[in-house]
Image (cartoon, helix red, strand yellow):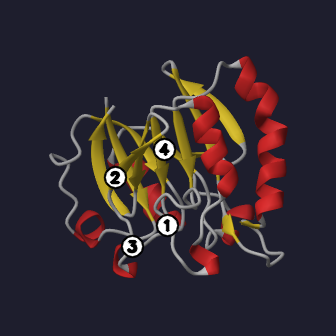
C-alpha cells in the first residue's frame, strides 16, 4: 500500500504544480501536524484516499474548525484495513496552550489509552507531531521529544513511527532510523512510502 506522509511544511510542488500521476496509487494520507487546513482539504480533494492527522502545536484553529474530509487521530486508536493506528498530537512545552504538553501531561494521556491499546494487541503505526526523546528531536526545550514515546515504542514495537515538528531547515534529523523494531520517519514536507 502506498502512503503519503506530510507534515510541517506545505509543499509548493503539491500546491502549485499538482501532478496526479505522482500520487497515483496512494491509498492513505497521514499528516503529522502543523499544516494549514486548506492544504489538508486540498490533498483529500485531489487524492482519492482518506487522510488521518494529528494536530501540531500550530493547529489551534482546528479546535473550532477542523479540516473537512479528514480524520483526527489525536488521542485515539483506530483500525483501518487491518492496520492499527495510534495518534498523539502536540509538542512538549510548559505553556498551558492547546496542543502543548509537559512530559507528565503526555504520560497521563498515554495512561488513559493503555487499556484500549492492550485490548487491540498493540498498534502497527504510531503517528505523532513531536518525536520521541533522543530519536530525531531537537536540542532546544521546545523541540525536545517525549520520553514516554520511547517507552511506548519499547513496549509495543510498532512497525512504523511517523512524526514531524523537526523542519528540514533546522539542520537536525529529517530522515529515517530504526528503534525497538520500528522504522522511524520524519514526515516533514512530503514523502511517499510503501507499507
User: Mark 4 = which residue?
Assistant: 161
| Along the line of sight, the residue nearer the viewer: 156 or 83 | 156
Secondary structure under tag 3 reads: loop
Residue 172, numbered label = 3
Residue 134 image point, x, y percent: 53, 61
| Crowd around label 1: few <14 · some 14–19 · many ≥20 (10 Å) | many
**Quadrant in the picture for the C terminus:** top left
Q: Quadrant of the N terminus?
A: top left
> Label 4 neighbourhood size at 10 Å, few (<14), some (14-19), many (20+)?
many
From the image, state whether disc 1 or disc 2 is nearer to you.
2
Q: Between 154 and 96, which is closer to the camera in this rendering? A: 154
The CA span between labels 3 and 4 is 17 Å
Q: Nearer the viewer, residue 47 or 116?
A: 116
Who's the residue at 57% across and 34% down the image? 85
Q: Say whether marks 2 and 4 touch (CB < 8 Å).
A: no
**Residue behind mark 2:** 176
Which residue is depicted at the point 77% across and 69% down? 98
* Of labels 3 and 1, the one closer to you: 3
Could you say whether the residue bearing mark 4 is in a helix, strand or loop? strand
The residue tagged 1 is 35
Separation of residues labelled 1 and 2 (CA atoms) = 21 Å
**Which sits in the foreground, 71 or 118?**
118
- Specify the quadrant of the image occupied by residue 113: top right
Amino acid at each position: 500500500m502506498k502512503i503519503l506522509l506530510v507534515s510541517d511544511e506545505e509543499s509548493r510542488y503539491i500546491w502549485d504544480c499538482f501532478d496526479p500521476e505522482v500520487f497515483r496509487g496512494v491509498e492513505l494520507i497521514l499528516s503529522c501536524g502543523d499544516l494549514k487546513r486548506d492544504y489538508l482539504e486540498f490533498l483529500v480533494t485531489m487524492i482519492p484516499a482518506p487522510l488521518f492527522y494529528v494536530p501540531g502545536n500550530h493547529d489551534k484553529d482546528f479546535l473550532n474548525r477542523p479540516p473537512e474530509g479528514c480524520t483526527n487521530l489525536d488521542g485515539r486508536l483506530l483500525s483501518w484495513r487491518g492496520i492499527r493506528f495510534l495518534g498523539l498530537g502536540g509538542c512538549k512545552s510548559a505553556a498551558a496552550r492547546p496542543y502543548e504538553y509537559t512530559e507528565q501531561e503526555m504520560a497521563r494521556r498515554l495512561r488513559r489509552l493503555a487499556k484500549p491499546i492492550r485490548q487491540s494487541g498493540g498498534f502497527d503505526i504510531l503517528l505523532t507531531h513531536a518525536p520521541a526523546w533522543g530519536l530525531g528531536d531537537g536540542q532546544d526545550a521546545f523541540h525536545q521529544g517525549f520520553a514516554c514515546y520511547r517507552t511506548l515504542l519499547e513496549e509495543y514495537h510498532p512497525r512504523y513511527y511517523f512524526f514531524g515538528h523537526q523542519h528540514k531547515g533546522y539542520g537536525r534529523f529529517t530522515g529515517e532510523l530504526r528503534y525497538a523494531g520500528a522504522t522511524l520517519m520524519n514526515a516533514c514536507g512530503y514523502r511517499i512510502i510503501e507499507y
